[in-house]
Image (cartoon, helix red, strand yellow):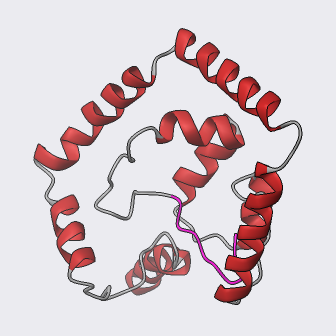
Amino acid sequence: MREGVILNPHYKDMGNLYGSEYWTYLLPARVGEDRARRVTQARLPMGVDEAFELGLATRRLPGNVESADWELLRAAAELAASPDLARRIAAKRAHRAGDEAEKPLAAYREEELRRMRRNFYGFDPSYHVARYNFIRKTPKSRTPVTLAVHRANAGHSDRRNTMR
């Protein structure tokens, strides 16, 4: 992951979208169930340090694009020339086959798409509004409450103070 990159590894602010294909397989496999739940429910942006702590990133690249590209090419060439590459690929293939035997990727996809259909065809239009705004790069009119938590709490205390 390049220095200075900010991830938003969740979909809920996109009209409460459930996810994207295979995230229920890939994310927990990468970071564990608890961390996957934390990432997808928190709705918070994440920097390089947190991505490393969670296991989403495994290599820290320089912030400069050209330097990062060079480092990435060097690392890929090193990996391709590694004497244990065939063993690593075989281990990944065996692990994937075990996962497939336990629950096929097609089942993950079908479950996710079943949930996402509600976003696309359900009664709540928020996904379509968010998609429209995202595609047209419409800026948000205000910071979401998930980021501006002080607004969510302030609203309650303001009402109490005005009722006294």
Q: Residue 52 lies in magenta, yes or no?
A: no
| 152 lies left or right of 3 | left
Q: Position of residue 121 (x, y in %)?
A: 11, 45
Q: Quadrant of residue 140?
A: bottom left
47 relative to 42, above or below: below
What residue is shown at x 38% (from left), y 47% (from top)? 20
In the picture, the quarter occupied by the C terminus is bottom left
The total number of labels drawn is 0
Q: Residue at horizontal 70%, vertical 43%?
A: 31
Nearer-the-camera pick, 8 or 118: 8
Q: Residue furthest top?
A: 101
In the foreground, 116 or 154: 116
Please, is residue 137 above or below residue 17 in the view?
Answer: below
The residue shown at (40%, 79%) is 159
Q: Examine the rendered structure and indicate whether residue 78 appears above or below residue 25.
A: below
Q: In the image, residue 112 lies at what x, y percent?
A: 35, 34
Q: Identify the image quadrant of the N terminus.
A: bottom right
Residue 64 higher or lower than 96, as above or below: below
Q: Is residue 2 magenta?
A: yes
Identify the residue shown where x is 53% and y is 51%: 40
Q: Based on the displayed image, in which of its 4 quarters is residue 33 positioned?
A: top right
User: Is 153 on the left-hand or right-hand side of 91?
Assistant: left
62 lies left or right of 26: right
**Occupied quadrant, residue 85:** top right
- Predominant SS along the magenta part: loop
Residue 63 percent location from the top left of the image: 72, 86
User: What's the magenta region?
Assistant: 1-9
Query: Along the line of sight, which residue is nearer the eye, 90 or 27?
Result: 90
- Of residues 25 and 162, which is closer to you in this image? 25
**Residue at the outermost right position:** 83
